Each structure stands twice: as C-alpha cells, then as structure tokens.
Amino acid sequence: MPFRYRLLVILALIAAVAPVASGQDSGPLAAMMARGSNPNGPFAKRLSASDSLVARARDQIGEGAAVTTDTSALRPGDLLMFGRGRSSAISHVGIYVGDGRMVHASTSQHRVIETALPATGSALRLKTVRRVLRDSTVARHGSE
C-alpha cells in the first residue's frame, strides 16, 4: 500500500477514535472503549516459557543461601560455581541434577550438556554452591 493511502487510513482511524477521546458518544465504539481491555481476551499478552524463565531468573538476583561444597550435601537445583586453581574468581556455573551430575554450557563442546561433576584433581574446582530453590525433598527430610 503506498504511503499516502496508509496515511489516509491512519487519519481515518484517528478521526474515528477522536470523539471517544473528547468525551462524545460515538455508539458501539464508545461502549467498547468504555469497557476497557479484557486481560483474558484473544489479544491479551500471555507469558511464554521464556518470559517465565526470565522472570524466575530475575527473582534470584542477590538471593541464594550458601551451601557447603561437600558433594554429599548437594541437592538437585543447586547452582555450582567453579574456578581455576587457587583464584577466588568464578569462571563457570552449572546446575546440580543429582547422582554426582550437573548440566552446564560446555566450553569445549559449545552446547549445553549433562556431565559428571569434575573430579577432585581437575583444574576446574568447585568454589561455592548456592541454593536458590526450595525443593519438596527439603520439607520431607526436615533439613534447612
């Protein structure tokens, strides 16, 4: 559609809505506008899985209880922070999934993988663990 026709359509739409904005009754359009939006209607914004994940991640900012780095104390969902050597700098993060395994973004494989926790003598050392989720197993076992 050429620009001048798009401009005419936009002006026509503005003219149709203008009486409502100025307080004049314009029939069905005014009635519809007076009702307001329908939060469950067909054009309502629904949270996608990615929106939910982002919201959940943002909820964790500044939170997380420190947990001992003893692997016997780990629970699925714990965030594992790794570093190299004696430095306190964190260079890698994984999520513990149980049975001595974690999910992380592999630097060498360039994708997200599930793997065993690094061995004790590995160059990558577990520096700290943070627990950000309250798991149903916590309430059953009474710890925490």
Image (cartoon, grey):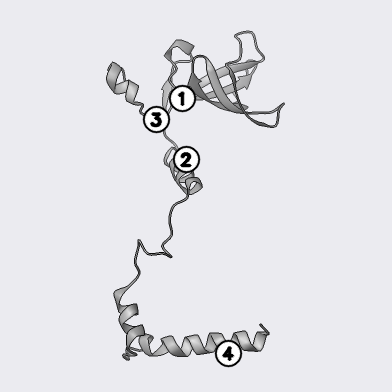
In three-dimensional space, the C-alpha distance between marks 3 and 4, rounded to whole angstroms, equals: 55 Å
Nearest to N terminus: mark 1 or mark 2: 2
Which residue is rendered at x = 45% and y = 39% of the image?
61
In three-dimensional space, the C-alpha distance between marks 1 and 3, rounded to whole angstroms, equals: 7 Å
Question: Which amino acid type is shown beneath numbered disc 1?
Answer: Asp
Question: Which amino acid type is shown beneath numbered disc 3?
Answer: Leu
In three-dimensional space, the C-alpha distance between marks 1 and 2, rounded to whole angstroms, equals: 14 Å
In three-dimensional space, the C-alpha distance between marks 2 and 4, rounded to whole angstroms, equals: 45 Å
Kindly indicate the quadrant of the structure image that contains residue 85. top right
Of the two numbered discs 2 and 4 in the rendering, the one whose residue sits closer to the viewer:
4
Q: Which residue is mark 4?
A: 8
Which residue is rendered at x = 61% and y = 21% of the image?
83
Which residue is rendered at x = 66% and y = 85% of the image?
3
In three-dimensional space, the C-alpha distance between marks 1 and 4, rounded to whole angstroms, equals: 58 Å
**Quadrant into which the C terminus falls:** top left
Q: Which residue is mark 2?
A: 57
Q: Which residue is mark 1?
A: 78
In this orientation, which residue lies closer to the viewer: 6 or 61?
A: 6
Characterize the local packing of mark 4: few (<14), some (14-19) or many (20 or more) Cα atoms within 10 angstroms.
few
Image spot of residue 106 (x, y percent): 66, 27
Nearest to N terminus: mark 1 or mark 3: 1
Image spot of residue 59 (x, y percent): 42, 41
Nearest to N terminus: mark 2 or mark 3: 2
Q: Secondary structure at mark 4?
A: helix
Q: Residue furthest right?
A: 108
Decide: is 14 above or below 53: below
Question: Which amino acid type is shown beneath numbered disc 2?
Answer: Ala
Nearest to N terminus: mark 3 or mark 4: 4
Characterize the local packing of mark 3: few (<14), some (14-19) or many (20 or more) Cα atoms within 10 angstroms.
some
Q: Which residue is mark 3?
A: 133
